[in-house]
């Protein structure tokens, strides 16, 4: 048991150091510790399943140890900036004011082809329109266009779009969610009126109904069962 | 902070569990080894009946730890240990003292390996 704990800790920190040294590209939208957890934990769990000669505890203890390491490290990195930058690194500016920062590309082992591919993924074909392109610590590339190139917003055009609001589900698959209805300041009578206006007899005939604070309703009736 | 402290407490608990496991395994493998030595001494003195009785005691001690060992020790190791014990028994029935001596050494070695595997050391970790 002690050996399993020690081996798990050694492997965990070895992976942490290795992946940290490899850089951001390998992470693919996961933070470093999340990536390690994801990579290792599934394999650990599978071993006792495949071989019944291995005690189940040999699979469970590493999972618990990894979980504890992840909680402790993520908790500590939340409170200590230096630890955070040591573990996760810092974002890198690959493009600054329309110019590719070649030094940063080389430092992150990011080829030009990969950069162009990422830009195409975000529908950016003209680098001169990009103010900043930032390679985040989770390996994702974020592109920020010059203000003049960004999509226009209704407020810039002087259009009043109303308050909007977050739509809450009031009926889900035929069931009324009373807590949400109450949160919206509505009641069963109001709901019954809405259903009646749409020729619906009962909430059971509704697949989805959402309402926001402005009163906007999305409604989808239940399809007939074959 | 609560979550982190809970995680640390869980790690400490696991370490304490590991320490208890090492102590317990050392203890019962030591007991079984001592019992095997008595059996071997009796066999070497020509008292095969006495050796068999002592061996039965060893098997009883090993069986007594069956639930615990099945949870913490790899099953092929346990199976191999049982095989060794029954091999000694067979040799004692045949009153073959010389072959039994080899089988006793093998069983003692198996018990040492089981205890060694649980102890943290460079050899067992790497």
Image (cartoon, coloured by chain):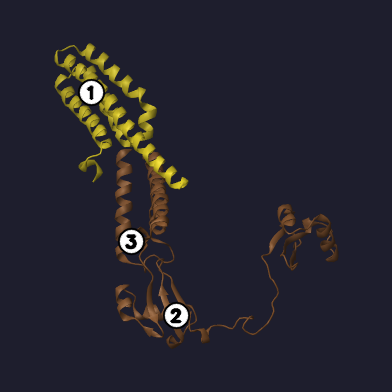
Chain colours: A brown, B yellow
Instruction: Check disc 3: other Cα within 10 Å, few if <14, some if 14-19, many if 20+.
Output: few
* Residue for badge 3: A86
Residue B82 place in picture, x, y as percent: 30, 28
**Residue lying at 72% horizontally and 65% vertically, measured from the top left:** A213
| Chain that bears disc 2 | A
**Residue lying at 33% horizontally and 67% vertically, measured from the top left:** A23
Q: Which mark is residue B33?
A: 1
The reply, left or right, for residue A43 in relation to residue B104 is right
Under tag 3, what secondary structure? helix
Q: Quadrant of the N terminus of chain A?
A: top left
Looking at the rendered image, the disc whose residue lies closer to the viewer, 2 or 1, is 2
Residue A7 place in picture, x, y as percent: 30, 46
* Residue for badge 2: A119
Whether discs 3 and 2 lie on one chain: the answer is: yes
**Residue lying at 41% horizontally and 81% vertically, measured from the top left:** A116
Tell me how far mark 1 sits from mark 3, CA to CA: 51 Å
Q: Nearer the viewer, residue A48 or A226?
A: A48
Q: Nearer the viewer, residue A110 or A76?
A: A76
Residue A118 place in picture, x, y as percent: 43, 77
Sooner in the amino-acid sequence: mark 3 or mark 2 = 3
Mark 2 and 1 residues: CB-CB less than 8 Å, in contact?
no
On the question of residue A226 being in view, the answer is no
Instruction: Check disc 1: other Cα within 10 Å, few if <14, some if 14-19, many if 20+.
Output: some
Instruction: Check disc 2: other Cα within 10 Å, few if <14, some if 14-19, many if 20+.
Output: some
Q: Nearer the viewer, residue A205 or A109?
A: A109
């Amino acid at each position: 048991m002690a050996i399993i704990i020690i081996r798990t800790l050694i492997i965990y920190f070895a992976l942490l150091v290795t992946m940290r040294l490899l850089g951001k590209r390998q992470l693919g939208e996961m933070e470093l510790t999340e990536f390690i957890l994801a990579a290792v934990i599934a394999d650990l769990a599978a071993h006792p399943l495949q071989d019944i000669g291995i005690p189940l505890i040999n699979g469970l203890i590493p999972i618990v140890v990894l979980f504890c390491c992840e909680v402790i490290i993520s908790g500590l990195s939340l409170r200590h900036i230096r630890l955070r930058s040591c573990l996760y690194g810092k974002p890198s500016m690959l493009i600054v004011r329309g110019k590719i920062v070649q030094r940063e590309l080389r430092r992150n082992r990011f080829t030009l082809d990969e950069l162009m591919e990422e830009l195409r993924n975000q529908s950016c074909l003209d680098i001169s329109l990009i103010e900043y392109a930032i390679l985040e610590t989770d390996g994702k590339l974020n592109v920020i266009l010059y203000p003049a190139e960004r999509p226009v917003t209704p407020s810039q055009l002087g259009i009043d779009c109303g308050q909007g609001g977050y739509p809450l589900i009031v009926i889900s698959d035929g069931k009324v969610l009373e807590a949400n209805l109450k949160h919206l300041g509505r009641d069963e009578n109001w709901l019954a009126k809405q259903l009646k206006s749409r020729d619906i007899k009962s909430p059971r005939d509704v697949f989805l109904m959402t309402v926001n604070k402005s009163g906007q309703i999305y409604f989808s009736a239940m399809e007939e069962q074959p | 902070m609560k979550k982190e402290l809970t995680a640390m407490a869980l790690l400490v608990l696991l370490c304490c569990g590991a320490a208890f496991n090492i102590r317990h395994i050392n203890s019962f493998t030591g007991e079984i080894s001592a019992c095997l030595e008595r059996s071997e001494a009796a066999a070497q003195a020509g008292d095969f009946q006495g050796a068999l009785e002592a061996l039965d005691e060893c098997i009883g001690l090993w069986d007594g730890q069956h639930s615990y060992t099945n949870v913490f020790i790899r099953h092929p190791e346990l199976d191999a240990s049982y095989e060794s014990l029954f091999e000694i028994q067979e040799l004692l029935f045949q009153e073959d003292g010389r072959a039994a001596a080899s089988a006793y050494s093998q069983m003692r070695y198996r018990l040492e390996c089981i205890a060694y595997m649980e102890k943290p050391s460079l050899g067992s970790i790497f």
